[in-house]
């Protein structure tokens, strides 16, 4: 199994540009999570999906952020327009639906975003 | 969300056991206790989880207090590769949002 795959691994862009981060979850996993990590705020949950449907997006910072999951094997996190304060590492994680005591999260390697 | 509290940082000597504490005094009866760790420049990875009984796996052991208000992650012999941030998380069986706190930054001294 290839694990959760994120792209790009590194992105440097200028303020005002659109940024799209991509995630391929592990096949068969029903849950997908997007997190953002900074030194100041730690790991923040932005949004999560169950069976491709957004369940909770209360962590999305503002309207400049949007996330989609058009099918079970692909999700995007888009920032438009980007700002320097969006600089962070963005992680995608997926989780299987299983018994009551499972639900381990599998994380990708992250996408490091720098907005100049 | 039920909350956990952990020390900000801990140190251990290489090849000695490490006990990482976590307090979760508001835990409910259906909350599972999960531990993750994050190595430098990587995403978090699952370590272990439990409900009431102590648990062992190849990575670590989890000791859960009888009243479930606290737990301890035990690394039996710390290696340099165990230097990471360790997160203690409570998860409801409904698999809802998973919230990470600041965690404990573990340093391993050679």
Image (cartoon, rainbow, N blue to C red):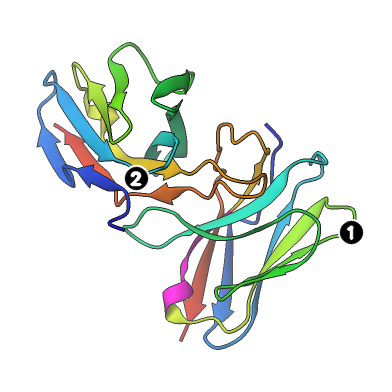
The picture places residue A78, in percent across and down from the top left corner, at: 23, 23
How many marks are shown on the rendered structure?
2
Expressed as whole percent of the image width and height from the top left, the position of residue B47 reads 55, 62
Residue that mark 2 sits on = A27
Q: Is residue A116 left or right of residue B46?
A: left
Placement of the N terminus of chain B among the 4 image quadrants: top right
Left or right placement of residue B7 versus residue A62 in this view: right
Q: Position of residue B15 (x, y in %)?
A: 55, 88
Decide which of A78, B80 is in the foreground and name it: A78
Which of the 4 quarters of the picture holds residue B18?
bottom right
Q: Which residues are magenta?
A: B81-87
Element marked by disc 2: loop
Tell me the mark number nearer the camera, choosing from 1 and 2.
2
Report whether mark 1 lies on the same chain as mark 2: no
Query: On what subunit does the disc labeled 1 rest?
Result: B
| Marks 1 and 2 close (CB-CB < 8 Å) | no
Query: Picture coordinates of residue A16 (x, y %)?
Result: 13, 18
Against B20, residue A84 (above or below) is: above
Residue in the picture at 58% in, 32% down: B96
- At label 1, counting other C-alpha atoms closer than 10 Å, the crowd grade (few under 14, some 14-19, many 20 or more) is few
Up-down: is B103 above or below A91?
A: below
* Residue in front for this viewpoint, B4 or A30: A30
Residue farthest along the top direction in this orientation: A63
Q: What's the residue at 22%, 28% (across, down)?
A: A84
| Residue B77 visible at all | yes
Residue drawn at x 39%, y 49% as measured from the top left: A107
Secondary structure beneath label 1 = loop
| Residue at numbered disc 1 | B66
* Residue drawn at (59%, 56%) of the image: B35
- Spatial CA distance of label 1 from label 2 is 38 Å
């Amino acid at each position: 199994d290839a694990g959760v795959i994120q792209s790009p691994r590194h992105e440097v862009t200028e303020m005002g540009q659109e940024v799209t981060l991509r995630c391929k979850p592990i096949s068969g996993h029903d849950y997908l999570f997007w997190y953002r990590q900074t030194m100041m705020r730690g790991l923040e949950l932005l949004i999560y999906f169950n069976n491709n449907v957004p369940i909770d997006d209360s962590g999305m910072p503002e309207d400049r952020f949007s996330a989609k999951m058009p099918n079970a094997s692909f999700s995007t996190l888009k920032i438009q327009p980007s700002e320097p304060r969006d600089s962070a590492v963005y992680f995608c994680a997926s989780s299987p639906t299983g018994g009551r005591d499972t639900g381990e999260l599998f994380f990708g390697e992250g996408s490091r975003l720098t907005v100049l | 969300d039920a909350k956990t509290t952990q020390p900000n940082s801990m140190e251990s000597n290489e090849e000695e056991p490490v006990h990482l504490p976590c307090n979760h005094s508001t835990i409910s009866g259906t909350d599972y206790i999960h531990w993750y760790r994050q190595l430098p420049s990587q995403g978090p990875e699952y370590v272990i989880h439990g409900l009431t009984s102590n648990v062992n796996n190849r990575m670590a052991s989890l000791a859960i207090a009888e009243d479930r208000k606290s737990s301890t992650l035990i690394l039996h012999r710390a290696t340099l590769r165990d230097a990471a941030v360790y997160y203690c998380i409570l998860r409801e069986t409904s698999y809802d949002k998973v919230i990470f706190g600041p965690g404990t930054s573990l340093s391993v001294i050679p």
